[in-house]
Amino acid sequence: MQEHEFATRLVAWQRLHGRHDLPWQVSDPYRVWLSEIMLQQTQVSAVRAYYARFLARFPSLPDLAAAPVEEVLTLWSGLGYYSRARNLHRAACMVMDRFEGRFPAVREQIEQLPGVGRSTAAAVAVFAFSRREAILDGNVKRVLTRVFGIEGFPGERAVEQRLWSLAERLLPQEHEAMPAYTQGLMDLGATVCTRGRPACTVCPMVDACHAAQHGRTADLPTPRPRKIIPVRHTLMLMPVASGRVWLERRPSEGIWGGLLSLPEVADTTAAEDWVARHGGGDVLSDWPEVEHAFTHYRLVITPVPVRLAAPPVAPGSGAWLPLAEAPDAGVPAPVKKLLLRLAGAPPA
């Protein structure tokens, strides 16, 4: 396919067959930016409800900037990749302070915001301001590698630079076509040129697509070189007293940063020491292990019920919460599952 044909085909296809009912298909930069952050590594189906709840609580950027970060994290609970929520709040504060409350319209300035990379900044600039900028998320990489036969793992620097160069050359010349073109790339990758079982028969590029014409849709993009995913282990205490459970605030950095969670210790000896420091009680039998997958490792959790004689004075940063309320307190997904089970069957 000639590169100049790509944009023309894509824009025409998007206007007829693309998605036009997404709640964030607006020109308000705050709403566009919020959706782009939520959609990072997260599917549209999962984002819709969170997006609506966020806008109900934070209808404008000043509302978000003025809120405590703990409240932002609580609303984000369950969506994963919690650094996005912390960066979202930091970025809102930065727009208020550095840009006097006006969302920047230039991609290079948007890229200065915490948690915003080049592709996300470009998407916001396109949808909110019709700027002529290229995006290159995972879906776009898949489309371009298949259509143009780009070899090599797209995460490698040299391959990614080649894809950026191609993405910039493919842009339509008209600024007014940019929103439809960019949305078309997203739609094509999400609904037609999918990772598994792409719907090549309805693709506007099929007659000129390298992968489709050579039977290589399963080969492209080139997969990431395999590596062993490390496994980490932790004991997670579930301290209960008088119908309440102790949750502690995690450090702002690292996994689940800033969320409430169950205390973690290294082993059973450390569990007994924890109980002794908090007024004494019983360490009960372990529950079956729970696994939770992160991007770069798997976490194996051993849940350990702990029965204390009475709730001591809150030890450090955290709170004693009623068992029925704890699962909704803004906790990580695996902790929420444990708390729901605990609420149904607290330690006897």
Image: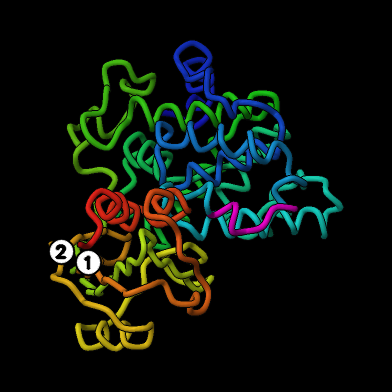
- Based on the picture, tell me whether residue 194 belongs to the magenta stretch: no
Q: Residue at the far top: name it.
A: 16
Secondary-structure class at tag 1: strand
Choose between 75 and 311: the one closer to the eye. Answer: 311
Q: Give the range drawn in magenta.
A: 66-73
Which residue shows up at 75% across the image and 59% down it? 94
**Do callouts 2 and 1 mark residues in contact (Cβ within 8 Å)?**
yes
Q: In which quarter of the image is the N terminus?
A: top left
- Tell whether 175 sits left or right of 52: right
Q: Is residue 84 left or right of residue 187?
A: right
- Between residues 82 and 105, which one lies in front from this camera angle? 82
The total of numbered circles placed on residues is 2
Residue under circle 2? 287
Residue 216 figure quarter = top left
Quadrant of the frame with the C terminus: bottom left
x then y, percent, for residue 157: 42, 63
SS at badge 2: loop
Height in image: 110 above or below 197? below
Is 48 above or below relative to 39?
above
The residue located at (62%, 48%) in the rendering is 121
Relative to residue 155, is residue 64 drawn left or right? right
The answer to which of 279 and 263 lies nearer the viewer is 279
Write the residue at 27% across / 55% down.
342
| Residue found at the very far right of the displayed protein | 100
Residue at the spot 30% in from the left edge and 80% down from the top edge: 265
Residue 219 position, x and y percent, is 20, 43
Q: Find residue 92 and report its horizontal and vertical position in percent.
A: 71, 53
Which kind of residue does numbered mark 1 sit on? Pro
Kind of residue at badge 2: Trp
Q: Position of residue 253 (x, y in %)?
A: 51, 72
Q: Residue 303 carries which label?
A: 1
